[in-house]
Amino acid sequence: MIRRVAAIHDLSGFGKASLTIVIPTLSSMGIQVCPLPTAILSTHTGGFIGFSFLDLTDEMERIVAHWKTVGARFEAIYSGFLGSPRQVDIVSRFIDDFRGEGQLVVVDPVLADDGQLYQTMGPEMVEGMGRLVAKANVVTPNLTELALLVGEAYREEVSLDEIKRWMRELSTKGPNYIVVTSVPVRETGQSSVIGLDAQSNRFWRVKNEKVPVSYPGTGDTFTSVFLGSMMRGESFPTALDRAVQFVSLAIRWSFGFDHEHREGVAIEAVLHTLQQHNLSYTYESV
Ligand code: PXL
């Protein structure tokens, strides 16, 4: 059976992010990606200035209208970087129109990182993402985005209990799975991902060694692998584990070269590992 995902992200030409990550990753996992592009940029916005930005909001309406007439169906809908507040409404309507039984609706609320909004994001986008996450069954914010979505001030030293409280609060808005990335592990200096499955009320954590650099596009890589794993029927904590391990592998492979970090991680060298089972499972219940 062909499993399809409607991928609502931008296309950035140079510097890996969004569709140039989403398409190869999910394709490698045997999933067909149908892109609904939100914008075309010369580069992503992390670490580049003076980039070109073609807003595709009007074109998105035309693409969706045509998809309706051809009977397009998707096993998953996955949205990421949005180019304008009006696009939030388009994605919201898209989810209503293309909703299906057992479908995964993943909203990656791309807004900010390390306590700072991305260059093209403002309060209207934060408010819009807040409305959009309510339509999803999976939301994958980083810690900064989680704080924004629940109206809390971002601090690096938030306790695990507090993060869990924020995650529960976000799940009361609608989504069953809340996945938070870039959560520091204070005791060990590691980083981690925490996942809540609200239906079974279980929290899971996967830790990984921190690399002393940050690469743009790792959030897109994480969520794409996580979604691919869930679509292949793997368990929620296994999907978290696989995504953490894949991102670590891609970062480690890239870190050995001295290309500029803003160019992103070179996933191509490690894509083949997505065809195998994980070599180890390190998730824990927290
Ligand atoms: O990786 C998220 C992302 C996607 N698309 C664009 C971005 C970013 C993050 O900076 O700038 C254009």
Image: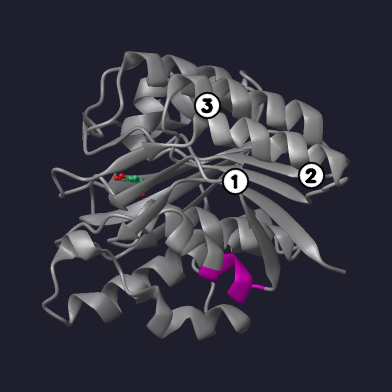
Q: Which residue is mark 1?
A: 36
Mark 3 and mark 1: Cα distance apart in space: 11 Å
Q: Amino acid at mark 2?
A: Gln
First reached walking from the N terminus: tag 1 or tag 2: 1
Q: Do the numbered discs 1 and 2 sit on residues whose CB atoms are within 8 Å?
A: no
Mark 3 closeness class: few <14, some 14–19, many ≥20 residues within 10 Å? many
Mark 1, secondary structure of its residue: loop
Q: Which residues are magenta?
A: 24-29
Dividing the picture into quadrants, the one containing residue 28 is bottom right
Mark 1 and mark 2: Cα distance apart in space: 17 Å
Query: Residue 87 — which label?
Result: 3
Residue at 51%, 60% in the rendered image: 22
Q: Do the numbered discs 3 and 2 sit on residues whose CB atoms are within 8 Å?
A: no
Against 31, is 84 above or below? above
Mark 2, secondary structure of its residue: loop
Q: Nearer the viewer, mark 1 or mark 2?
A: 1
Mark 3 and mark 2: Cα distance apart in space: 21 Å
Q: Nearer the viewer, mark 3 or mark 2?
A: 3
